[in-house]
Structures are given as C-alpha cells and as structure tokens.
DNA sequence: TTTACACATAACTTGACAGTTATATATCTA
DNA sequence: TAGATATATAACTGTCAAGTTATGTGTAAA
C-alpha cells in the first residue's frame, strides 16, 4: 500500500492525526475512532505496510508512532502544484473566471 | 470522491501531472496513459467530481484543465506533518535510531 | 447527408477494501 | 496457575473501484 492509498481512508488519516501528538497505544486509538478494535488493528497494519507508522511492544500494549518521513513522498508530489496555485497567472485566471 | 481518494490512483495522479503543463484534450491523455480510452474517460469523470479538473468543449474535443485550488485541501492536511518532519527533535530521533 | 472522429456511457467482471464477529496469542495480575 | 487485559488474526460479507468491450452521442469533414 502506497502512502497515497493509505491517506485515502479517513480513519487512517485520523490515526495519523492522533499520532502527531506522540506515541499512542493501540487501545487509545480504538477509543478515539468510531470503528471496532479489529477494524483499527487492520488500519494500523496497512499504515505499517505503508511505512507511515511503526510499533513497539510495551508490556501487553503496543505503542504506535508516526513515521512522518514517509509523508515526504506525498509532499514531494504536491510541491509543483503548490507552485501552481500560488502562481500569479493562476490567481488571475481564477479572478477572471469569477467575473464571468 | 474526495481529493484524497482521487490521488490514491496512479493513473489519476499522472493525469494531473500532465495537466500541470496546461489544458489538454482527452485524447492526448489517452495516448499518454497505458489504459483504454474509456478507462481514461472514467478517471476524468472522477477527477471532475473531486473538483480537481474541469472541462470545456472545443469542437469535437474536450479540453481538460487542472483545478489546483482543490489540492489545497490535501496541502492543508499535510501542513502540520511538514512541520513534524522538519522538526529538530524529529531529526534527532531519526539520527539516534540510525545509530542503534 | 453519409462517413469519420472524439469522447462519454452502458454493461459486465474481477479483485480489493472496509467493516463485522469470533478466536487466537501474549502478557500482566491475583 | 487461572483469570483478565491488550492486541492481532481468521473468516466472512457487502460494497465499490478499476479495468475491459461494445455502443451511444455529438461534431467535423467529404
């Protein structure tokens, strides 16, 4: 699963958002989401396969951590577009359009 | 279809990449991709529904254009992560890990 | 006014994903 | 050692996306 595919699912984005606050046990993520525990576990697996999170054992819990580095791939793809929408020409086109 | 879902598919990302160079007729996109004409047409529809492209008639052709503004939604989601991976603390963690 | 062209839509197949419940595995605790 | 807890996996179902071929629709050209 590529990072792009991983981000397509809202629950997975929410998981990443939660992990931005630091390491979290799986159970805490389960509480925060509106789906079942196995559902969360499956999303965590896909996120791991995408390299977007990592996990380590802590007793009977598993602590998940954000691997933000993998998101640079998405960021890199987006970069040239960022230039596009900040373009003065682009802004002008939008402006002319809105006047119709 | 959300922008996130739209970007999950590589052919659609390629279409957007091509449209970064300016308006293109559908046929030109068909030539560039490795899938059938109806396949491309369906992707274009989804991209339209996601607001990522727009189309206008030009004789018997249809010219597609990038609507980069919609990508700001993705960019906005990504923004706080961008901070995360440029963090000095984050860099330090990566460094310590690589030493193991 | 046919024929050709560009594109969209219809209809269908296949496979993957997201969700569920039930169960297995491992660790902690009484 | 016997529960109790935390998490993962198995097994299953329903939905949907992505691809295909075949066909429809509108515009250009002969």
Image: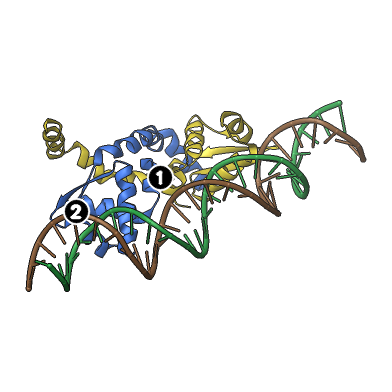
Chain colours: A yellow, B blue, C green, D brown
Q: Position of residue B82 (x, y in %)?
A: 37, 36
Instruction: Say which quarter of the image contains residue A90.
Output: top left
Q: Position of residue A68 (x, y in %)?
A: 44, 40
Q: Position of residue A18 (x, y in %)?
A: 51, 31
Q: Residue at x 12, y 55 (%)?
A: B59
Q: Residue at x 64, y 37 (%)?
A: A37
Q: Nearer the viewer, residue B72 or B44?
A: B44
- Secondary structure of the residue carrying tag 1 is helix
Total number of numbered labels?
Answer: 2
Residue B100 in view in this figure? no
| Residue C3 shown left or right of residue D29 in the figure | right
Q: Is residue A11 above or below residue A45?
A: above
Q: Provide the residue designation for mark 2.
A: B62
First-in-chain label (1 vs 2): 1
Q: Provide the residue designation for mark 1.
A: B5
Q: Position of residue D28 (x, y in %)?
A: 9, 61
Sort mark 1 into few (<14), some (14-19) or many (20+) by Cα contacts within 10 Å: some
Q: Is residue A18 above or below residue B30?
A: above
Q: Nearer the viewer, residue C4 or B4?
A: C4
């Amino acid at each position: 699963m590529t990072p792009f595919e991983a981000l397509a699912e809202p629950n997975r984005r929410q998981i990443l958002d939660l992990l931005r606050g630091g390491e979290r046990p799986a159970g805490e993520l389960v509480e925060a989401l509106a789906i079942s525990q196995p559902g969360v576990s499956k999303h965590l697996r896909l996120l791991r396969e995408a390299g977007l999170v990592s996990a380590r054992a802590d007793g009977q819990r598993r602590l998940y951590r954000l691997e933000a580095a993998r998101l640079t791939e998405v960021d890199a793809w987006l970069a040239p577009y960022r230039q596009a929408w900040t373009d003065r020409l682009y802004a002008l086109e939008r402006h002319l359009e809105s006047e119709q």
